Amino acid sequence: MVDDVAGTPTTKKVTVANLLAGAGGEGFFDKGKLIFPTNSSNGWTETKDNLASIDYYLPYAQLDMGAAQDDDTYICSSKHIPSLPDSGKTLICGFNLWRKTSANTDAFLGLEDDGGVPFGTTDNHYGFFIDGQDLYATNGNGSSQTSTDTDVTISTSAEMNYLHAVWTQGTDIKFYCNNILEATHTTNLPSATDWYLKMGHRNVSGTGSLYLSNAFVEYER
């Protein structure tokens, strides 16, 4: 079993004792994970401006942006996730992604309380914003936003990255890129109780595709 919640994986044998005790000291049955398959349109609400297109393949979804400036191409979970964690409990969202785009495109991957698009900077949300090739950690509480430039470059030439964010209710949100902690936020933590998983990108003045795979939300009971 591997527990990468803290960004520092530990490995244990899969035995009955370890399943009951949990990896890294966390109870195996104290968490619930929701997997959002990206190989089908089932369960997703699509936004495709102008000539944008979204295709689903066995291992991933391919989002091709429209040709006009400010065209949005997004997928958003059709149903909300009714899960505000109790104080001290965690809510995690994670994604695998790669891009084939010009540098003049933006992307957002995270949880937001609004099923519409595009992502609003002060909305109740947390996740990742990619400005060109610069990765930002971001969250908001409905009126204010906290944002950090992680100094991580997200390639536009099909390099895969794994992003995940761990929100501990009442404490902080930790943002990881490829299991490396890049930012910790303690201000403007979200307060919404209903969440939508939202992923997509916007044409600033460029073209290209965003590829998404193995999106998930995990909550601690």
Image (cartoon, grey):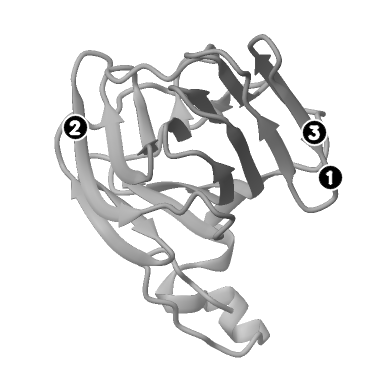
**Which of 70/54 is in front?**
70
**Of helix, strand and loop, which one carries label 3?**
strand
* C-beta proximity under 8 Å, tags 2 and 3: no
Give the amino acid at mark 1: Tyr
Quadrant of the rendered structure where residue 67 is?
A: top right
Q: Is residue 163 above or below residue 167?
A: below
Q: Is residue 27 above or below residue 100?
A: below
**Of helix, strand and loop, which one carries label 1?**
loop
Give the amino acid at mark 3: Asp
Q: Relative to residue 61, is residue 126 drawn left or right?
A: left
The span from disc 1 to disc 2 (Cα, nearest Å) is 35 Å
**How far across and how far down the image is residue 16, in percent?**
67, 83
Quadrant of the rendered structure where residue 85 is?
A: top left
The residue wearing badge 2 is 146
- Say the numbered circle drawn on residue 55: 3
**Which of 156/195 is in front?**
156
Q: Nearer the viewer, mark 1 or mark 2?
A: 1
Any part of residue 46 in sight? yes
For label 1, the crowd category at 10 Å Cα-Cα, with few meaning under 14, some 14 to 19 and many 20 or more, is few
The residue wearing badge 1 is 57
* C-beta proximity under 8 Å, tags 1 and 3: yes
**How far across and how far down the image is residue 21, in percent?**
51, 77
**Which of 101/146 is in front?**
101
Give the amino acid at mark 2: Thr
In the rendered image, the residue lying farthest to the left is 187
For label 2, the crowd category at 10 Å Cα-Cα, with few meaning under 14, some 14 to 19 and many 20 or more, is some
The span from disc 2 to disc 3 (Cα, nearest Å) is 33 Å
